Amino acid sequence: MGGRDASRGDADDARRDEPATDTRPPGPGTQRKARRRRALKIVAAALAALVLASAATGAYVYEHLFGRIRTVSLAHLTHRPATAKADAQGNTAQNLLILGSQTRDGQSGPNLGDSSKLGTDISDTTMLVHVSAERKWAVVVSIPRDLIVPRPQCQGRTDPTVTVSASSAAMFDLAMNLGGPACAVATVEQMTGIRIDHFVEVTFNAFQELTTAVGGVTVCIPPPGINDPDYSGLVLGPGLHTVSGGQALEFVRDRHGVGTGTDLGRIQYQQMFVSSLFAKLTSAGTLSDPITLYKVANAVTGNLTVDDGLKSLSAMVGLAQSVAGLKSHYVQFVTAPYVFDPVDPNRVDPGQGFAAVWDDLRADTPLPGSPAAGAFGITASRSPSPSVSMSASASSVPLASLTVKVYNGTSTPSLAANAAANLKALGVSTSVGDSGYSGFAKTEIYYPAGQRAQAQALAGQVVGAEIEQSSNVGTLTLVVGQNAPANITATPTHATGPGTGTNASPSATISAESRTGDQDICSSLPTPVRYGGHP
């Protein structure tokens, strides 16, 4: 028995030394574990592939979008204004110059002109966007393309070895055509004393594709509508319309079907369009949709020129974030104050209040009378122009109760129509009278007996106007003289040019040619006329 025990023990020891083998089929639990391990490996591999694909796609998208942006350096500019000072929290205001190029090179669409436009790059649309240091308000100043201002010496647009001579009096829009966007920046900096942090130049193609990518922009056409088939190509009846692509471009380019057919009426339509576009871009869902966001970026970057400090994802994101939190009510659109040039009525010169706008923006101060001025502790403490003495009864007269007949007392065309349009934007009921007054050096307001308070209320909106009772008029009559600014509202009286100081106490109102970002898009627009014609 003992031998059998010893033999069994040797056999057990031998089996322990051999590899363990189990000929029984695996149980259900073992199968599940194996499947889980295989699934985990597959998921891990898929995730790794997804990460690599995402990285590759992201790199492709980045290169695709940002690789197409054209850049222009501002490093060669000299005598630039100082960078904006930081506030108590270390934040600085941002100043962006938006340039709308009318170049036909590489552009597509109807009504863009003939081959004579090829090779040019004029800035038909220019807006200086000032975003406050605290990012709570902004001012967008439209600079008329026909504004006559000094231009500094610049490098040539097509050949940087060529020098574009300085000019003491040149049309603003030619600066970009002669010296490229850097020359436009230098001209604005010299004109305003404001350092431009970045610029963006947009072409016709970019504009058309952007408006299509966001699904169109709502615009307002006042009666009787716009019928301009031969110039811009725009034919639209009165009312609200959603325009995109080529039609949107026709809208912002149209001037022959607007008001008196000048660029100045077109500016007000452009401001309305931009405020409506801003509302669309900041509305819920527009830019939170990745597909829409990509379409917008893809539309813009292919036809964009920026300064070299803006060609990076972080710079673009930073710029977007600087305006993302703005409330449209505190975005003020204005036109740089101007007067019609006495030599060439198709040109305009800096008018009263021109320097005051730049003074306020350099100081990062909201424009007096704007919603931002009251909301952020800046009070409109400025007094009316010394030429206007308003009584207590005059200050209580609502502008909407006034009916005014406007005449041109000069040989400069369009002064009466322009004044009437601007007063109408303030709520005044206006009509333009036939010629009958001439040789008026000063602007006069004639009023019938019993309407002195109404005349004073009107005078409060007209710089330099004098009032006089007359038995020859049956209603308030405004005769525009050579001293009247184009923006008829009483604006600050400053010398033109930055840093020249104040000559008189400015008014507490902003230009009549202005609007807030949330203003009814059908208000403050010049009445269109049925122009038509031939290119």
Image (cartoon, rainbow, N blue to C red):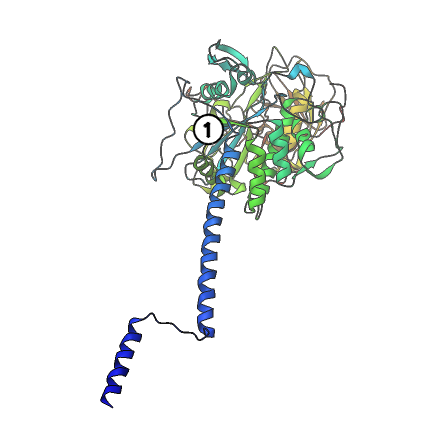
How many C-alpha atoms fall within 10 Å of the one at disc 1: few (<14), some, or many (≥20)? some
**Quarter of the figure that contains the N terminus:** bottom left
* Residue 463 rendering spot, x and y as whole percentages: 56, 24
Residue 65 located left or right of residue 397:
left
Helix, strand or loop for disc 1: strand
Q: Residue at x 25, y 86 (%)?
A: 5
| Front one among 13 and 74 | 13
Q: Splitting the image into 4 quarters, where does residue 189 fall?
A: top left
* Residue 166 rendering spot, x and y as whole percentages: 48, 10
Against 521, is 197 above or below? above
Q: Splitting the image into 4 quarters, where does residue 275 fall?
A: top right
| Front one among 37 and 342 | 37
* Residue 31 rendering spot, x and y as whole percentages: 47, 70
| Front one among 442 and 367 | 367
| Front one among 33 and 467 | 33
Residue that sits furthest to the front in the current view: 3
Against 195, is 332 above or below? below
Residue at the spot of label 1: 198
Residue 188 located left or right of residue 420:
left
- Residue 326 appears anywhere in the view: no
- Residue 210 appears anywhere in the view: yes
Q: Amino acid at mark 1?
A: His
Residue 269 located left or right of residue 76:
right
